[in-house]
Image (cartoon, grey):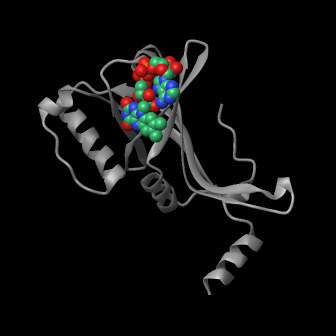
Amino acid sequence: MKQGITMREREVTDINEILRILDTAKIVHLGMADGDEPYVVPMNYGYTYLDGKLMLYMHGATTGRKLDVMRANPKVFFEIDCDLEPFEGSVACQYGISYSSVMGRGTAEILDNPQDKMAGLTYLMKTQTGKDFEFNERLVSAVSVFRINVTDFTAKHRPLPIAIQKAKENDND
Ligand SMILES: Cc1cc2nc3c(=O)[nH]c(=O)nc-3n(C[C@H](O)[C@H](O)[C@H](O)COP(=O)(O)OP(=O)(O)OC[C@H]3O[C@@H](n4cnc5c(N)ncnc54)[C@H](O)[C@@H]3O)c2cc1C
């Protein structure tokens, strides 16, 4: 069930800012349902955003639990975050961390076609390094590549408290 972000002032709707988060973060926490048990795996990812459609690409070994789980149930949920900046206060409840994050759900698709796998690895390396890499069929046959066809996502930003932002600005002057 989709639920709205409760603290509206922190929702990010600017797609350019959302793409910046996806470019910056590098790690996705991919949630799956292993029968009636949750299973979450951290992974590196690449992404594409074309015609309003977000897709994530991941790669790994050709065997393992996540692949077994995805084959049985391709529905996934993901979380990605960056800009982590802890801050302090005078009492415990004033401590916190600023962050930017994207979460969403989708369907996992394990790619069989070598051309699709090569494209997926190229997107992955572009997001991870900012560089363009090319792959051949021999290389892609040794790994699994899968894509998350994202159906919906939300993004959120928790800024530093204003007083801390101002103190940082003063330090930089
Ligand atoms: C920052 C980061 C980035 C990563 N990037 C990638 C990536 O791009 N591609 C990739 O394939 N893997 C990546 N990994 C490793 C990934 O988290 C999994 O360990 C790996 O993909 C194997 O997953 P699996 O479900 O096949 O596990 P299996 O090898 O089948 O695992 C069996 C059991 O081992 C335990 N286990 C598995 N993974 C972990 C883990 N990470 N930490 C603790 N216990 C674990 C679980 O209990 C699991 O049930 C990354 C890990 C980290 C921390």
Name the spot of residue 166 as percent of width and height, x first. Answer: 71, 78
Q: Residue at x 30, y 51 (%)?
A: 126
Q: Residue at x 70, y 47 (%)?
A: 5
Name the spot of residue 38 as percent of width and height, x first. Answer: 59, 21
Q: Quadrant of the C terminus?
A: bottom right
Q: Quadrant of residue 161?
A: bottom right
Q: Residue at x 48, y 40 (%)?
A: 28
Q: Residue at x 34, y 18 (%)?
A: 63
Name the spot of residue 71 as percent of width and height, x first. Answer: 40, 16
Residue nearer the viewer, 12 or 67: 67
Residue nearer the viewer, 126 or 3: 126
Position above or below: 98 against 66? below
Name the spot of residue 25 as percent of width and height, x first. Answer: 48, 51
Q: Quadrant of the N terminus?
A: top right
Ligand 1, by image quadrant, is top left
Looking at the image, the residue that sits furthest to the right is 91
Looking at the image, the residue that sits furthest to the bottom is 173
